[in-house]
Amino acid sequence: QVQLVESGGGLVQAGGSLRLSCAASGRTFSHYAMGWFRQAPGKERQFVASITWSAGSTVYADSVKGRFTISRDNAKNMVYLQMDSLKLEDTAVYYCAADQYYSGHYTYWGQGTQVTVSS
């Protein structure tokens, strides 16, 4: 199995920035597409961004385009989400996830990290 651990969440003012990190471990981790999702209280889980193993392709939800950037460092088994120009509606628990077969179905999930944006 693959273990994913998110970090970097916290409290930030609207307009500010945070960088989330996802550390991947496990002997089977290899060439997975990676994604970030978020879930606000009482709301459904929402896709945020995804990236291929080579980092040659990225996809963003319309709500974060131009503000968030997903990246990865395969040598360090790390995936990142740089979040700029944060808005109140970005407040959520953010989850890192792995897609083994590039199918859009994410098999492995981290525990989540809380991001709270204040006015």
Image: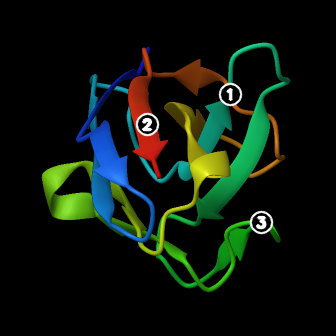
Tell me what residue is drawn at x 56 percent, y 22 percent.
108
Q: How is the image coloured?
A: rainbow
Quadrant in the picture for the N terminus: top left
Amino acid identity at mark 2: Thr
Residue 98 position within the rendered picture, expressed as x and y whole percent measured from the top left: 56, 37
Along the horizontal axis of the image, is 103 left or right of 98? right
Residue 117 position within the rendered picture, expressed as x and y whole percent measured from the top left: 45, 46
Residue 73 position within the rendered picture, expressed as x and y whole percent measured from the top left: 25, 65
- Which labelled disc corresponds to residue 63? 3
* 10 Å crowding of disc 2: few (<14), some (14-19), many (20+): many
- Dot 1 falls on a residue whose secondary structure is strand
How far separated are the C-alphas under marks 2 and 1?
Answer: 12 Å
Amino acid identity at mark 1: Gln
Query: Dot 2 corresponds to which residue?
Result: 116
- Marks 3 and 2: which is nearer the front? 2
How far separated are the C-alphas under marks 3 and 2?
Answer: 17 Å
- Dot 2 falls on a residue whose secondary structure is strand
Tell me what residue is drawn at x 16 percent, y 61 percent.
75
- Compared to residue 44, the image places residue 97 above or below, namely below
| Numbered marks: total | 3
Q: Earlier in the sequence, mark 3 or mark 2?
A: 3
Out of 103 and 112, give the one closest to the viewer.
112
Q: Earlier in the sequence, mark 2 or mark 1?
A: 1
- Dot 3 falls on a residue whose secondary structure is loop
Residue 50 position within the rendered picture, expressed as x and y whole percent measured from the top left: 63, 60
- Which labelled disc corresponds to residue 39? 1
Tell me what residue is drawn at x 85 percent, y 24 percent.
44
Q: Earlier in the sequence, mark 1 or mark 3?
A: 1
Amino acid identity at mark 3: Ser
